[in-house]
Image (cartoon, rainbow, N blue to C red):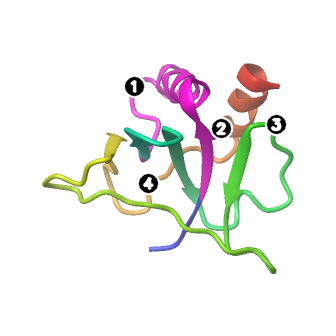
Amino acid sequence: MQFDAVRVDGDEGRRLAFLMEVIAGGEPGPVVVEANGRRAVYFLVPAGSTVGRSWPEGVITLNAAAGRIGCVPIPALAGRTWPLVWHFPPTAPGRFVHALLLPNAAWALLG
C-alpha cells in the first residue's frame, strides 16, 4: 500500500486529529500517534496528495516526491507496538484521511 503522511508534533497534532474527527463525523481515516519523543501524530493520506500543496508551519509532509526520503512508523493492527498506536485505525482498503479537508483544517488550527 502506498500513501503520503502528514506529521504534526505534540498537542497541535492531537488537536488536529480531534478537529478532523469532528469534521469527518467520527471517522477521519487512519491516524497514528506516538506516545513518547516528539509525540508525533501521522495522518495517512492518498499517495501524491501532499506534493505541491501549501501547509502551515509545524506540518511536515512525508512523501515520495523527487529528492525526498520519508519514513512513517506504522503500528500493528493487533498487538502491542508501543510507543505507536492507532488513534483511528484503517477501516477499509484504500480509506485515507481526506486530502482536501486536512490542509484546510491544518490552516484553520495552525495557520
Give the spatial CA distance, label 4 vs label 2.
Answer: 14 Å
State the residue position of label 4.
95
- Amino acid type at mark 2: Leu
**Residue 80 horizontal side relative to residue 32, left or right:** left
Where residue 14 sits in the image (x, y, percent)? Answer: 51, 27
At horizontal 66% and vertical 36% (from top left) the residue drawn is: 101
- Amino acid type at mark 4: Arg
At horizontal 81% and vertical 42% (from top left) the residue drawn is: 55
- Mark 4 or mark 2, whichever is nearer to me: 2
Where residue 10 sits in the image (x, y, percent)? Answer: 55, 31
State the residue position of label 1.
26
State the residue position of label 3.
57
Q: Which residues are magenta?
A: 5-30
At horizontal 24% and vertical 54% (from top left) the residue drawn is: 81
Tags 1 and 2 in contact by the CB under 8 Å rule?
A: no
State the residue position of label 2.
102
Indicate the secondary structure of the residue bearing disc 3.
Answer: loop
Where residue 102 sits in the image (x, y, percent)? Answer: 65, 38
> Does residue 101 belong to the magenta stretch?
no
